[in-house]
Amino acid sequence: MPTLVFVESAEGKIKKTSLEAVAYAHALGTPVTAIALGAVDTAELESLGKYGAQKVLHVADSKFNQGVIQAYASVLTQALADEKADILVLADSSLGTPIAARVAARTGSSLASNVVALPDTSTGFVVKRSIYTGKAFANVALNNAKKVISLKKNAAEAKEVGGAASVTPYTVSVPDADFAVKILSSEKATGEVLLPEANIVVSGGRGMKGPEHWGMLEDLAKVLHAATGCSKPVSDLGWRPHHEHVGQTGVKVAPQLYVAVGISGAIQHLAGVNSSKYIVVINKDAEAPFFKAADYGIVGDAFEVIPKLTEALKAAK
Amino acid sequence: MKILVCITHVPDTTSKINFIEGNTKFDPSGVQFIIGPYDDYALARAIELKEATAGATVTVLNVGPADTEPTIRKALAIGADDAIRINAEPTDSFFVATQIAQEAKAGNYTLILMGRESIDFNGGVVHSLVGEMLGIPSVSPVMKLELSGNVAKLTREIEGGKEEVEVSLPLVAGCQEPIAEWKIPNMRGIMSARTKPLKVVEPKTVDSGVKLQKFELPPPKGAVKMIAADNVAELVNLLKNEAKVI
Ligand SMILES: Cc1cc2nc3c(=O)[nH]c(=O)nc-3n(C[C@H](O)[C@H](O)[C@H](O)COP(=O)(O)OP(=O)(O)OC[C@H]3O[C@@H](n4cnc5c(N)ncnc54)[C@H](O)[C@@H]3O)c2cc1C
Ligand SMILES: Nc1ncnc2c1ncn2[C@@H]1O[C@H](COP(=O)(O)O)[C@@H](O)[C@H]1O
């Protein structure tokens, strides 16, 4: 029986987290059917074959161009039935997680979100979830035949396994009631690397002294192809937009590299970055708690170190 | 208007997390428990709406054993009118959502506010599950919620931005800042909370097909490598050749 994977796209391109979901499903050892809704490039959909999908269902109807959660959940529920798929895999996101919950409730599936690793199938089907805001994990058995698994970033590596996928148009009629939530407008940073999905994040704290100094962090982010983030006080003070605030009460990031500049490393901030693979801390105070969570540290004044670091990175290219 | 606010009873954000009984149980020793930070935003917005709407009431609900009652009382002290505790260990999201949906239906609430996420389970799903179980819309994470009559206008955070949405009540919303400012209970609130009604309800039996096997802590972090401030080239070298991340 195939595994169904919901893939999301942004600006016509499949999101990396969705490629990870396809790779995750492929690693389960079952055939993989991916499903995408709204306007996505056909070539992009075909490229899912390289990550392990055999078949891609595309719901091209423009009423799905906006991510309407209940309508998407109806489509996925129908697709699970049509494909005779028992497992749905998707990436946690503002769209993916609520869809996962609704589909699970509709289909009577065992549900796990925030999943960080492939299942252990030696005794049943046990997934590892991140809990206590990255401070611990829970291994939970999903006992129902039907399962919905929603993945935290990096739960599987999006690697190319070769292969080709056929793209099939797919239509489902959904009730009008599914469109009860009307999206009036949306504002989205475009062309930039989005913080929740970035491989590298450059983040600034109150040590940056004011919004006028963010230019140097943006320059550093640019050479690293990184997203920019910040600590909570920085967004509270209005120096940076709210969606850049990292931590317990903000975005939880899981990049390959997190560069923290002028951030003290309060436990609530660390809760949002503790899934990063490597952490670099630049702080003028050698006693800053962030150094204890870091892989590499520099004690120094950000205003001197950052421009030098940017230059050195440029030179190393 | 009847508002239901679902709150969690969770370790304070600075807590060290440990497990006992062969990593099958959370170790509460030395841990301070609080209302979930996002649930606190939901509660604060609910109180504001109650103050602005004649005849509105706020009920808080927790699915948890008796030791969550001090946290529930705190929510009453902040200004909720009454409380419900569903007497069960909150074992998984589906179980919790089933209990909440059952009570929500019985009480005919028109607005159900939750946090965007619990900071112990980190499921981010209970609001959507409850919405689905009740057959009503759910929106999360909500940064702004305004009501005009039966229609709610909300600002929802999405990756790298936000969207404005409109929906008719009944509705479930998962809240986060800056929807409202956290409220701190005052003396009068604390006194009156003692006598406000707290109803204890026995749970409905459900099998969600999800079972905890074991908790686990992340492996300890290795020591930090310090690099001199005038030697940024060394940092570049390490990132390139040791960490291999650039
Ligand atoms: C319930 C709760 C939830 C919270 N959630 C979050 C959250 O999600 N995210 C979050 O970030 N915080 C959160 N906080 C706040 C958190 O406790 C800290 O207050 C906050 O992270 C501190 O931000 P900061 O490090 O930018 O500022 P500060 O603590 O003021 O630290 C500034 C740092 O900059 C350094 N510095 C100063 N000048 C320079 C210079 N020229 N060069 C280099 N370094 C310099 C200083 O040495 C210092 O270490 C939360 C708090 C609570 C109570
Ligand atoms: N045990 C519980 N009792 C009451 N409400 C809960 C409980 N668990 C979760 N919730 C609500 O559901 C929201 C989302 O939780 P979660 O899906 O666990 O991240 C929380 O912020 C609470 O508002």
Image: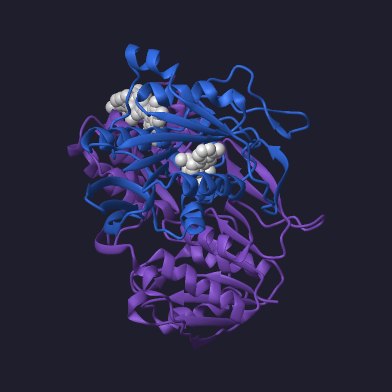
Residue at position x 47%, y 46% from top? B104
A95 left or right of B17 in image: left
Is B113 in front, or is A98?
B113
Indicate the position of residue A17 as horizontal and vertical percent values.
49, 61
Indicate the position of residue B83 as horizontal and vertical percent values.
46, 30
Q: Colour of chain B?
A: blue
Q: Quadrant of residue A191?
A: bottom left
> Vertical placement of A100 versus A281: above or below?
below
Q: Is residue A275 visible?
A: no
Residue at position x 41%, y 75% from top? A175
Indicate the position of residue B60 as horizontal and vertical percent values.
44, 34
Residue at position x 36%, y 74% from top? A176
Work out which residue is located at the far left of the displayed protein and give it: A212
State which quarter of the image contains the N terminus of chain A.
bottom right
A146 left or right of A174 in image: right
Q: Quadrant of residue B204?
A: top right
Is A201 in front, or is A8?
A8
Q: Quadrant of residue A310?
A: top left
Indicate the position of residue A313 as horizontal and vertical percent values.
37, 49
> Vertical placement of A194 versus B112: above or below?
below
Is B91 in front, or is A153?
B91
Chain letter, purple: A
